[in-house]
Amino acid sequence: HLDTVADMSLERITLLTKTWIDRYTNLLPRKDIAYVLPFENRGEECGVTLHHPHGQIYCFPFVPPVIEKEISSFKKENFILSMMQSLEEKYFVFQDDHMIAAVPPFARYAYEIWIMPKKRKAGPWQFTEVEIKSFSNCLQKVIKGYDSFLQKKCPYIMGVHAAPNLEDDTFHFHVEFYPPLRSGDKPKVLAGSESMAGVFIMDVLPEESAILLREHINK
C-alpha cells in the first residue's frame, strides 16, 4: 500500500501501464467524455493531503487548453519527433530502443523531464507488449532517479498526455514531469514573472540538470 513506482517490480508497473490503457479504451469512446488525463501529484509541495502513494484520472467533457495547443501544434508538425531527431544527447537522461527520457531545451522547471516513445503513438493503447515494458521501465528509472538525486522522495506533478480519441493520427504521446523545485531541494514558487507574464525563470540550464539527473537515473 505504501510502495511508490520507484519501489515496485517491473511487473507491477507494467500492470499500471495496462490499467491506464484499459481506462483510455473504455472511457474515450463515451460521448460525455472529451479527454482523459491520468496524473500524479506527489509530495506536500504539490498540495498532496493523502500521503499514501496514489495517482488519479480526470475525465473532462471538453479538451483542456494545454492539450488543445498541443493538438494544434501536432497538426502542423510532429514537434516531439522533430525535437527527438534534432536533440543533442546532452539533454537525454535515459533511452533504450523504444523510449527517450530527456530534459527538454524549453523546460520551465529546473528538473523537468519528458518521456517520449521514439515512434509516434497516439496513446499507450497503441504500444506493443515490448513497448509497454520499455515505457514502464523508463517510468520507474525516471522516478527512481529523482529520488536518488534528492536523497528523498522527490515531489513532482506527472501528467500523461495522450490523444483525445483512439484513432488520432497526429498526436505524439508523452509524459511530463514537473518537480516544483528551482535548484537542489529549494522550492520553485511561481512568482511575478511566471504568474503575471507567463515567463519562467530558470535557475539551472536544461543541459546542466540533465547531467545531474542522468547520473542518478542510469545508476
Image (cartoon, grey):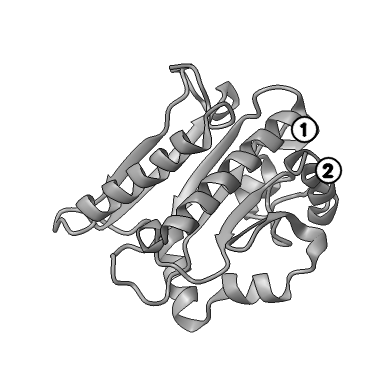
Mark 2: few/some/many CA within 10 Å (<14, 14-19, 20+): some
Q: Name the element at disc 2.
A: helix
| Label 1 SS | helix
Nearer-the-camera pick, 126 or 176: 126
What residue did someone put label 1 on?
Answer: 149
Using a 10 Å C-alpha cutoff, classify the residue at mark 1 as few (fewer than 14 neighbours), some (14 to 19) or many (20 or more): some
Q: Is residue 102 visible?
A: no
- Do the CB atoms of the residues marked 2 and 1 lie less than 8 Å apart? yes
The three-letter amino acid code for the residue at tag 1 is Phe
As drawn, 170 above or below 57:
below
Picture coordinates of residue 90, whole percent (x, y) = 82, 60
Residue 212 shows which numbered tag? 2
In the rendering, at what x and y percent does residue 182 appear?
Answer: 76, 38
Say which quarter of the image contains residue 219.
top right
Q: Which mark is residue 98?
A: none
Q: Closest to the observer: 217 or 158? A: 217
